[in-house]
Amino acid sequence: GRHLKLPASTFNVQEVRTMKILRRKAVCEKLGGINDVTLWRITRDDPTFPVCIQINKRVVGWLEHEIDTWLGQKAAAARTASNNAVHP
């Protein structure tokens, strides 16, 4: 069969051991209970949102740590924006 050969430096053992794929429903729940259409809009409109992984012809998923990183960046940006807001 065909196998994708990755250089040894691509992943360290700890990252591989902790990788988890989230399916669409789990991603929606993690993002505050949004629906499928809202997730689709985010994937379409936000270039910073992680790219999904095609698991087979009908199934896609996202790496949980990439979703977590994206959420952290959104939270940090929101905090920065509120700290910089002018309060009357």
Image (cartoon, rainbow, N blue to C red):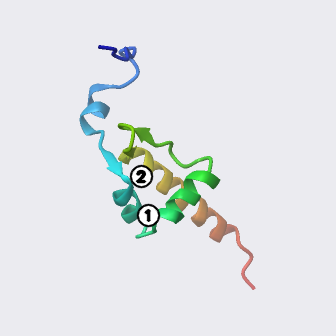
Tag nearer the camera, 2 or 1: 1
Answer few, some or many: residues within 10 Å of disc 2's Cα (few below 14, many 20 plus, some between 14 and 19).
Answer: some
Residue 84 location, quadrant: bottom right
Q: From the top left corner, tell me how far across and down residue 71 is, in percent.
A: 48, 56
Residue drawn at point x = 43 percent, y = 45 percent: 66
**Is 11 placed left or right of 51 in the picture?**
left
Q: From the top left corner, tell me how far across and down residue 40 is, in percent.
A: 53, 57
Q: Is residue 48 above or below residue 1?
A: below
Tag of residue 69: none
| Labels in figure, total | 2
Q: Which residue is mark 2?
A: 68
User: The residue under label 1 is which amino acid type?
Assistant: Leu
**Is 43 placed left or right of 36 in the picture?**
right
Q: From the top left corner, tell me how far across and down residue 52 is, in percent.
A: 46, 43
Residue drawn at point x = 39 percent, y = 38 percent: 57
User: Which of these two is toward me, 19 or 69?
Assistant: 19
Q: Is residue 63 above or below residue 88?
A: above
SS class, disc 2: helix
Q: Which residue is mark 1?
A: 31
**Is 45 placed left or right of 32 in the picture?**
right
Q: Residue furthest front?
A: 57
Distance CA(mark 2)–CA(mark 1) = 10 Å
The quarter of the rendered structure image containing the N terminus is: top left
User: Which of these two is toward me, 9 or 57?
Assistant: 57
User: Which of these two is toward me, 50 or 25?
Assistant: 25
Residue drawn at point x = 37 percent, y = 17 percent: 4
Answer few, some or many: residues within 10 Å of disc 1's Cα (few below 14, many 20 plus, some between 14 and 19).
Answer: some
Residue drawn at point x = 40 percent, y = 70 percent: 33
